[in-house]
Amino acid sequence: MKIEKALSSKLPNVDLKNLSFGTVFTDHMFVCNYKNGAWEEPKIIPYQSLSFDPSMSVLHYGQAVFEGMKGYKDDDDKIWLFRPDQNFERINKSAARLQIPEFPKKYFFEGLTELLRLDADWIQKGIGNSMYIRPFVFASQPGVQASPSEEYTFIIICCPVKAYYGGEVNVLIAEEFSRAASGGVGFAKAAGNYAAQFYPTALAQKEGYQQIVWTDASTHEYLEEAGTMNIFFRINDKLITAPNNDRILDGITRKSIIQIAKDNDIDIEVRPIKVSEVVEASKKGTLLEMFGSGTAVVVSPIKSFGYQGVNYKLPVIENPLSTLLKEKITSIQYNLSEDPHGWRLAVD
Ligand SMILES: *Cc1c(COP(=O)(O)O)cnc(C)c1O
């Protein structure tokens, strides 16, 4: 892999204590192009703007998928990735669904580790601080013919992120809009899935909700995802989350939480969960917690949910499972605890 180092670092001009998520990028980026039926030799270059033809396929037909992952620095300045094999597999599953060619594993891991080595100084120590890593691939062939592109560009960019408390969110259960349909692309981390969420979410925000809880597209009876996170419910002492299907994104945080819950003898059920069950539990006072899960915030507790014009508040409880699970997962990520499942990968 060719590496062209930045002549100087932007880091001295960046206030790492005051970062807003996803707005500041490190000194380097990884780029790999697909042409003539093959991925070319990748390279790392200084972070920069790129220029493309206005007819570039992705701008018209939307073949674009991405990943979101993090690098963590431990107390000894060692950098760790969390289950990166899962991100690699998932970006290729997403790509396959959008008729984008698979990306080679060797390039993915070389790109990640080399970028983290080069831009290691951008990662702050301390729980919550991390390097957010954004691999993505898009159709970069010029031309407006409505067919799969014959050229693609795979890029990895990185942003330093600091610990932040997202606060508890109010969510609105979807009764009309849908995020994903059976047979569609909901399971893929496709850029278009996000585009389709912005409008309904903006409407919900006007009503005072921060996120929408997506329900199944055909009946709106089953709870599926919270905004761009997976969702968990706690009824009495049982945690419940929906099973994966082709409408639900197979979240790495979600599957890690399920495993950690099992490891800690927390009662966990992976099964379809109805809106009516959650509403009833809330009325009876047995709905104790709801939270979203995803790489960006790990766990995002939910304060209330809206459904059919009624707002249902979650109780304030001591020692919520969401806090316990978040602590367990972050202590693995930051190399503060044992890693019984071999989820950590050291970047040396
Ligand atoms: C990325 C994403 C998630 C969370 O996945 P993680 O691997 O846990 O970060 C959940 N739902 C949607 C729709 C997503 O795009």
Image (cartoon, rainbow, N blue to C red):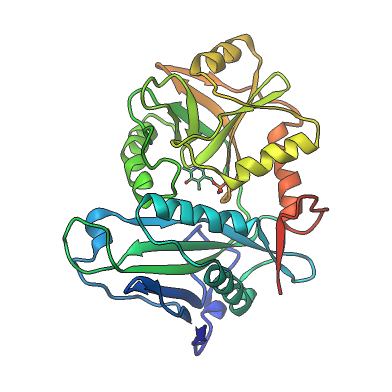
**Residue in the picture at 47% in, 56% down:** 92
Residue 7 in the image, given as x and y percentages of width and height: 50, 90
Residue 136 in the image, given as x and y percentages of width and height: 43, 62
Task: Tell me where residue 235 sits by quadrant.
Answer: top right
Residue 295 in the image, given as x and y percentages of width and height: 58, 50
> Quick one: 260 or 139, which is closer to the camera?
139
**Residue in the picture at 60% in, 52% down:** 164
Q: Is residue 38 left or right of residue 76?
A: left
> Quick one: 166 or 218, which is closer to the camera?
218
**Residue in the picture at 28% in, 75% down:** 51
Q: Residue furthest bottom?
A: 7
Q: Is residue 292 above or below residue 11?
A: above
Task: Tell me where residue 80 sits by quadrant.
Answer: bottom right
- Asked whether residue 239 appears in the rendered view, the answer is yes
Residue 31 in the image, given as x and y percentages of width and height: 43, 74
| Quarter of the image that includes the C terminus | bottom right
Q: Is residue 100 left or right of residue 28?
A: left
> Quick one: 233 or 302, which is closer to the camera?
233
Q: Residue furthest front?
A: 37
Q: Is residue 297 above or below residue 336?
A: above
**Residue in the picture at 56% in, 29% down:** 242
> Quick one: 327 or 83, which is closer to the camera?
83
Q: Is residue 121 left or right of residue 319?
A: left
Task: Tell me where residue 233 sits by quadrant.
Answer: top right
